[in-house]
Amino acid sequence: MYICGNILSMMNRNFIPKNLNNIQEKGQYTWKSPSNIALVKYWGKSDPQLPKNPSISFTLDACHTITTLHFQKKEVNDDDFSFDIFFEGKKKEDFKPKIAGFFERIHTYMPFLKAYHFEIHSENSFPHSSGIASSASGLSAIALCLMSMEKLMNPAMEQEFFNNKASFLARLGSGSAARSIEGELVVWGEHKEVLGSSNLYGVTLEQEIHPVFKKYQDTILLVDKGEKVVSSTVGHQLMHKHPFAEQRFEQAHENVSAMLSVLKRGDLDRFVEIVESEALTLHAMMMTSMPYFILMKPNTLAIIQKIWAFRARSKSHVCFTLDAGANVHVLYPENEKEVVLEFIEKELVDFCQKKHYICDRAGNGAIELNGDAQIYTELEKQ
Ligand code: DP6
């Protein structure tokens, strides 16, 4: 089922640029890139950031990162990456190791990186301390800015290649970031029924999608805004010796198959079943790792119970999913917006920290922003 090493390295090689002309001294690009929420989860990977199973997600709309990348050719060529990173206007030394690691991993595919000094300015639409992972939107935004640079040096580049490589680079920063380039539904990881699917990058789902899934709603209940006790990176590693790993990876393949059919038919009952089972399986994997850990909080469970009770007494198709954290994503079709929001306001907000929640929905992917939206830069002062 998986492509063999040789083919994989050939495909990797496709992303190494051959002819880069039109080298620019300086410039800047700004991209707005969304977060995403997985319906079938990615949990477990091998080097370099290859998923152990296919996953499928809704690209989000409101939760996004805006990043401006300024670049200036170095006067003296050296062998180092040179960059500064600013988050919401403040210089962030503590973000540097993560970005340096990312540059290191993508350098083969972006050979011009060491020839420039970069200034990266980022801001999120959601509060930093909301417990919402910003790595998917943050790393996809940087990847897209770098792709704009590459396109400048290779204007003949086609849109499909641009998107695939942006996703490929983003993946090398954070796995789930591979699914944050396009919308509304993205598959990442090889699956026999998804033509063109790849472990290297995410692809938009091209099949027929039932209209009930258009603008699907995701209300994110902020249950715990604190640091996670175990990072996703560590969690993924714990899948290596996990007693149920192989069955889980197989199940994800089956759930992607089932989800493809649900998305075509508009079968909301089955949708609810797959999505909730995936969320609970993800957390079951955490609870059965060695060492084991729990990321849900009492309020996460209280919300789940309330959602089940509400669904049992109403005709609603509201359901929940979870990321690697305590927050709850409440998913429902657009035509149920009014009733579900009323239910959330009445019965769920008390379980959220400071009653905070974010209303989001499935969206269309990243967009390049023009000069007006660009953020103040140190380089401009020079
Ligand atoms: C639980 O993408 O954050 O959200 O590849 O180590 O950066 P790294 O992990 P990350 O994993 C998150 C996985 C998940 C499920 C999912 O989004 O599919």
Image (cartoon, grey):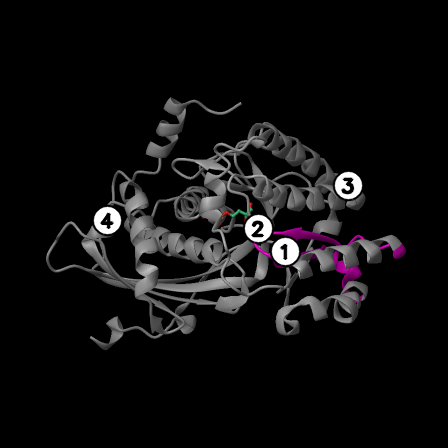
Judged from this view, the residue extending furthest toward the left is 76
Q: Which mark is residue 270?
A: 3
CB within 8 Å, label 4 to label 2: no
* Mark-to-mark CA distance, 4 and 3: 48 Å
CB within 8 Å, label 3 to label 1: no
Q: Which residue, given by chain and number where applicable, does mark 1 sit on?
A: 362
Callout 1 amino acid: Ala
Callout 2 amino acid: Gly
Work out whether 248 lies above or below 355: above
Q: Which residue, given by chain and number where applicable, does mark 2 sit on?
A: 183
Residue 317: x and y in percent read 80, 52
**Residue 275, visible in the rendered structure:** yes
Residue 235: x and y in percent read 49, 44
Callout 3 amino acid: Arg
**Is 318 placed left or right of 243 in the picture?**
right
Q: Earlier in the sequence, mark 4 or mark 1?
A: 4
* Mark-to-mark CA distance, 1 and 2: 8 Å
Which quadrant is the C terminus positioned in? bottom left
Q: Earlier in the sequence, mark 4 or mark 3?
A: 4
Q: Earlier in the sequence, mark 3 or mark 2?
A: 2
* Mark-to-mark CA distance, 4 and 1: 35 Å
Q: Earlier in the sequence, mark 4 or mark 2?
A: 4
Which of 95/208 is in front?
95
Which-is-in-front pick, marks 3 and 1? 3
Callout 4 amino acid: Phe
Asked whether mark 4 and ligand 1 are closer than 8 Å, the reply comes as no
Q: Secondary structure at mark 3?
A: helix
Judged from this view, the residue extending furthest toward the bottom is 381
CB within 8 Å, label 1 to label 2: yes
Q: Which residues are magenta?
A: 313-338
